[in-house]
Image (tube, rainbow, N blue to C red):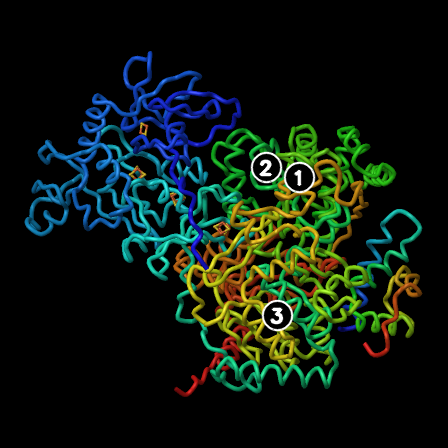
């Protein structure tokens, strides 16, 4: 497959694109160019293909006008204005080159270089340095200054290169202005000796990332970039390692360590991050097939040139020695693994599966598709069970995260996906964030939201914890509704109650867009006093006055958008809360235009896609129930088989059926259900009861401890395909290097199907996409050619919407009229009591991802080496727990131990932890309660007790022993 | 699946539909179960109902005639 050719203008345009669309025409070096008003002269020149030299300007941040290298002459104006800070005007005539400009620029450059070492040849940014480029562009040929006061020389001996100084006069007196390199961050270095103090990094940290970790200290010749307080190095500062400053830095001052080590990359392939549901576009930059770095792609429509620490830096797991590259089999899970050839592995597996089918029937087998794999791969896995196994036993990790979104939004609006694109947030006036922690879970979206908050948009957070978004620097008005875990429906209903009873509902919208009768009965229901904030305060813990204020602000506040995460779905009333959220959006008329909408923040990179591709046991691709004969007919024609009209088993049902003895074989691609699913002991019992567990993954994950066949997987860097992000955006994943394990995942699934006699012969994922488009109306016009041409496209993409659909439900809901659904609050059965008086809720943090299989195998561990339990000082004191103590965390399901950290981010009575590390096993503690409609587990509420402890629990020790035993490998004889 | 777990799941569904307006709650409860429960789970539920339906809410019992009986060989 050929590399994707970057558009010739993958240029830094110098200044951002302005918001306006009033055209302005001007002449630059005699050429006419028309640009939107508000564009800088610099950007206009770039649009015309004329580069103006620049140092302090870059198009990710506002112009600053400090370096004076970008001077131009403008007819009729005096002097030489900076082109980056001068806006275009109608009829303006600009000259970018003249003798005078040439001299001025050279002078500027000479001054800069006088305080910069001349070690270009050995500098890590050689070939990738704007200072170097600009010195060339302005024709700097000489340095007339004699070395004097400077920041670059380690010693005072005087000289222009650091290497020279080190070699010739190692003992000379040290230079007090010289600050050595800070390499505390595992991924990039800060080398103050090479800094030109252009402040691009400081502005990027503020404007792009929104963290404000960097400042410029002092003034004039003394000014330096600093990571906050004097004692802070990069690692211990507020820096979240997003890389925006590294991206913005024109010199080697802030630079990826990988480039220093491997050299500058010479080719780039566009692809999509495989971590979270934001789906950032990246350039994978390589030398040969060695990946040198991943840089965010400026034209990526989800991320607009930004990234977070995971996508930008945490890709090293692909090369980790733990990665398994050969297939392995074993007769029982007590045996060590035996490395075998692909043929032998397939033969072994096919025989076992056939035996199980003969003995226990075709419904005794199933699959789990992966939200980390591509759409094409997921499609094939569900096709395997439907067309080859002959049942609908397919499920995916979305079961444990966003299945209620599918059900809830399907019932109310008629589609199972978010309504907006991420750009929409730029027009949001007030945002509700409920049960999500975007700065950690969806960092690039959080940065985009923070940008809007700094412009004055208001924020309502509904979450048991005081999440970081609430401390966004320079934000506007905000409300935090710190509810007790498990009371989402009560809070959402109370908001609706205030809106309806205070006459704030948008009746015009409701009359035209929604089913009016259903609204009437909903309004009667919600008006009832039992939904008022005062009546629910005791239950939810949310002060009624705050809740009323927040409801009024949302109803009156202009464009209102709702963003939500797993804190909504992972409850016994998850689906009901999703419906309640849809009700709120319809009540306030916040659907169908930019700046509004209902937006589930999807957990994993392709969880949207895996749902779209028919991973659920009751739905064929495109969310169509298997009971419908006309839908089955489409696939029966395409696949030449008969499709079972009965819904299949969901993950928890598979495990139940396994314990019961009617479910015997599972093909699990790219998921680690033993670690990620609730009630670990039950999962382990289910897996142990099966006769053929096939794990297809990069690493021997926890589930593999119970597997009989291990098929090595490929990383996102090693295959072609597509991911669909939380905005329904279908993005290309491209093969950056050949699979180390020999085969892309879709090829492995195909081999397995063919070993069972399927006779598939796909030779490229593009053909799988053709099949998807031919069978699934929302994908009808999606082709690899279209994606090549447009970069990405949001479904539905068909004849009605040939360019895709950024905004849903614009003129009407997909299902016709929007439906208001009555949402009665019901307490979860999981209650606190004397034995388990605290409520445990779970989440994730920025540097780690899900079960951590990937991020734990990168340097990201410096930020999060273990899971910790957050506990309120009051609860800690009662129990005699101090910061960092080992504690025992117990529920009615089980117990585990971990370390405590004391913080008032959580309310009294609530404790919180992450589940990134297998030895913590937080899911030993979570219970088997689940959402009423979808069986999505109730991760977010478990009644627990916490007590001091002195080390790992028996379960942890047994588990570790079993895992070690189970991971033994006998290599294939050479 | 343990009988308690099945009873809890069926009751959760019934509780939601019981809260909905209209007079077709039993039908909707059954429809939900038909749409989402694999035949062996429905078999268990119907067997449990036939054996007296201990622990099940009245709406689940009312839904009984509408729950699709799985084919014997499934
Ligand atoms: S570190 Fe880089 S971006 Fe920041 S001021 Fe120095 S040269 Fe400019
Ligand atoms: S990496 Fe990101 S957070 Fe850290 S200093 Fe740079 S821009 Fe700021
Ligand atoms: S993890 Fe998410 S936010 Fe971070 S780079 Fe990847 S897609 Fe973007
Ligand atoms: S680029 Fe315009 S002043 Fe620096």
Q: Are marks 1 and 2 in contact (CB under 8 Å)?
A: yes
Residue located at (86% from left, 38% from top): A524
Q: In which image quadrant can residue A54 be found?
A: top left
Quarter containing the C terminus of chain A: bottom left
The reply to whether the residue tagged 2 has its Cβ within 8 angstroms of ligand 3 is no
Q: Nearer the viewer, mark 1 or mark 3?
A: 1
Q: Is residue A583 above or below residue A270?
A: above
Q: Are marks 2 and 3 in contact (CB under 8 Å)?
A: no
Q: Which residue corresponds to mark 2? A: A424
Q: Secondary structure at mark 3?
A: helix
Q: Is residue A528 above or below residue A644?
A: above
Using a 10 Å C-alpha cutoff, classify the residue at mark 3 as few (fewer than 14 neighbours), some (14 to 19) or many (20 or more).
many
Sequence-earlier tag: 2 or 3: 2
Figure quarter occupied by ligand 1: top left
Q: Is residue A464 visible?
A: no
Measured as percent of width and height from the top left, residue A663 is found at 71, 77
**Pointer 3 chain:** A
Q: Which residue corresponds to mark 1? A: A597
**Pointer 2 chain:** A
Sequence-earlier tag: 1 or 3: 1
Measured as percent of width and height from the top left, residue A966 is found at 51, 80
Q: Which residue corresponds to mark 3? A: A680
């Amino acid at each position: 497959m050929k590399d994707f050719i970057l558009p010739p203008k993958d240029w830094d345009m110098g200044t951002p694109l302005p918001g306006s669309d009033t055209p302005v025409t001007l002449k630059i070096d005699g050429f006419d160019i028309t640009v939107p008003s508000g564009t800088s002269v610099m950007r206009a020149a770039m649009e015309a293909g004329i580069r103006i030299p620049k140092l302090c300007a870059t198009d990710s941040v506002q112009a600053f006008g400090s370096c004076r290298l970008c001077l131009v002459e403008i007819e009729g104006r005096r002097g030489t204005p900076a082109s980056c800070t001068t806006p275009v005007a109608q009829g303006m005539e600009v000259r970018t080159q003249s003798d005078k400009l040439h001299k001025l620029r050279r002078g500027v450059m000479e001054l800069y270089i006088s305080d910069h070492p001349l070690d270009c040849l050995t500098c890590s940014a050689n070939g990738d340095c704007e200072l170097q480029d600009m010195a060339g562009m302005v024709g700097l040929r000489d340095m007339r200054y004699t070395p004097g006061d400077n920041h670059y020389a380690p010693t005072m001996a005087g000289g222009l290169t650091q290497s020279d100084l080190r070699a010739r006069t190692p003992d000379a007196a040290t230079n007090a202005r010289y600050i050595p390199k800070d390499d505390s961050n595992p991924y990039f270095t800060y080398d103050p000796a090479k800094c030109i103090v252009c402040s691009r990094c400081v502005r990027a940290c503020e404007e792009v990332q929104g963290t404000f970790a960097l400042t410029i200290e002092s003034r004039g010749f003394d000014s330096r970039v600093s990571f906050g307080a004097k004692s802070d190095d990069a690692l211990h500062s507020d820096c979240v390692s997003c890389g925006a400053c590294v991206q913005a830095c024109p010199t080697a001052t802030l630079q990826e360590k990988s480039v220093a080590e491997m050299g500058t990359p010479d080719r780039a392939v566009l692809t999509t991050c495989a971590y979270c549901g934001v789906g950032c576009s990246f350039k994978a930059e390589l030398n040969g097939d060695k990946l040198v770095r991943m840089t965010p792609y400026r034209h990526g429509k989800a991320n607009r040139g930004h990234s977070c620490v995971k996508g930008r830096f945490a890709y090293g797991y692909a090369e980790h020695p733990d990665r398994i590259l050969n297939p392995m089999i074993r007769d029982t899970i007590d045996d060590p693994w035996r490395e075998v050839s692909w043929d032998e592995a397939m033969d072994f597996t096919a025989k076992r599966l056939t035996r199980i089918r003969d003995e226990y029937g075709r419904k005794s087998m199933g699959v789990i598709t992966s939200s980390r794999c591509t759409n094409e791969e997921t499609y094939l896995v569900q096709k395997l069970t439907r067309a080859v196994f002959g049942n609908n036993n397919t499920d995916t990790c979305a079961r444990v995260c966003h299945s209620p979104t599918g059900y809830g939004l399907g019932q109310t609006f008629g589609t199972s996906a978010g309504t907006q694109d991420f750009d929409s947030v730029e027009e949001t006036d007030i945002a509700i964030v409920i049960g999500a922690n975007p700065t950690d879970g969806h960092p690039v979206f959080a940065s985009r939201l923070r940008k809007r908050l700094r412009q004055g948009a208001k924020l309502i957070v509904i979450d048991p914890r005081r999440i970081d978004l609430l401390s966004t620097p320079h934000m506007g008005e905000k409300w935090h509704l710190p509810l007790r875990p498990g009371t989402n429906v009560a809070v959402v209903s109370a908001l609706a109650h205030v809106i309806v009873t205070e006459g704030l509902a948008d009746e015009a919208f409701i009359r035209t867009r929604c089913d009016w009768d259903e609204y009437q009965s909903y309004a009667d229901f919600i008006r009832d006093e039992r939904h008022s904030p005062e009546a629910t305060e005791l239950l939810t813990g949310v002060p009624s006055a705050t809740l009323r204020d927040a409801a009024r602000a949302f109803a009156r506040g202009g464009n209102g958008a709702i963003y939500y995460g797993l804190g909504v779905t992972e409850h016994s009333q998850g689906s009901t809360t999703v419906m309640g959220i849809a009700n709120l959006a319809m009540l306030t008329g916040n659907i169908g235009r930019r700046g509004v909408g209902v937006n589930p923040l999807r957990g994993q990179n392709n969880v949207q896609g895996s749902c779209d591709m028919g991973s659920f046991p009751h739905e064929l691709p495109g969310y169509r129930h298997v009971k419908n004969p006309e839908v089955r007919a489409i696939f029966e024609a395409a696949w030449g088989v008969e499709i079972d009209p009965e819904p299949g088993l969901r993950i928890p049902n598979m495990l139940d059926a396994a314990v019961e003895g009617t479910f015997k074989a599972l093909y699990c691609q790219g998921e680690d259900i033993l670690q990620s699913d609730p009630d670990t002991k039950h999962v382990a019992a289910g897996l142990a009861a099966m006769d053929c567990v096939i794990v297809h993954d990069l690493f021997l994950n926890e589930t593999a401890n119970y597997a009989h066949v291990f098929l090595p997987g490929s990383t996102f860097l090693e295959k072609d395909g597509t991911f669909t992000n939380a905005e329904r955006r279908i993005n290309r994943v491209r093969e950056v290097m050949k699979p180390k394990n020999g085969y892309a995942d879709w090829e492995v699934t195909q081999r397995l199907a063919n070993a069972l006699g399927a006779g598939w012969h796909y030779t490229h994922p593009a053909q799988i996409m053709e099949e998807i488009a031919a069978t699934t109306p929302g994908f009808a016009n999606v082709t690899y050619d279209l994606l090549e041409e447009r970069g990405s496209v949001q479904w539905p993409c068909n004849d009605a919407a040939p360019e895709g659909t950024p905004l849903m439900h614009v003129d009407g809901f997909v299902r016709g009229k929007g439906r208001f659904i009555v949402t009665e609050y019901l307490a979860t059965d999981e209650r606190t009591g004397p034995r388990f008086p605290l409520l445990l809720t779970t989440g994730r943090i920025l540097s780690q991802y899900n079960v951590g299989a990937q991020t734990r195998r990168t340097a990201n561990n410096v930020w999060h080496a273990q899971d910790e339990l957050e506990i309120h000082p009051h609860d800690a004191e009662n129990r005699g727990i101090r910061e960092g103590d080992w504690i025992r965390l117990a529920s009615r399901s089980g117990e585990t131990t971990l370390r405590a950290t004391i913080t008032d981010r959580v309310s009294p009575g609530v404790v919180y932890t992450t589940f990134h590390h297998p030895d913590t096993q937080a899911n030993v503690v979570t219970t088997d309660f689940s959402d009423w409609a979808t069986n999505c587990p109730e991760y977010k509420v478990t009644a627990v007790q916490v007590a001091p402890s002195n080390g790992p629990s028996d379960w942890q020790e047994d588990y570790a022993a079993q895992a070690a035993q189970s991971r033994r490998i006998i290599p294939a004889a050479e | 699946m343990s009988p308690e777990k099945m009873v809890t799941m069926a009751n959760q569904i019934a509780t939601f539909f019981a809260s909905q307006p209209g007079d077709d709650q039993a039908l909707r409860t059954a429809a939900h179960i038909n749409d989402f429960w694999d035949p062996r789970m429905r078999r268990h539920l119907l067997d449990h109902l036939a054996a007296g339906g201990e622990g099940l809410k009245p709406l689940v019992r009312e839904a009984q005639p509408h729950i699709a009986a799985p084919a014997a060989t499934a």
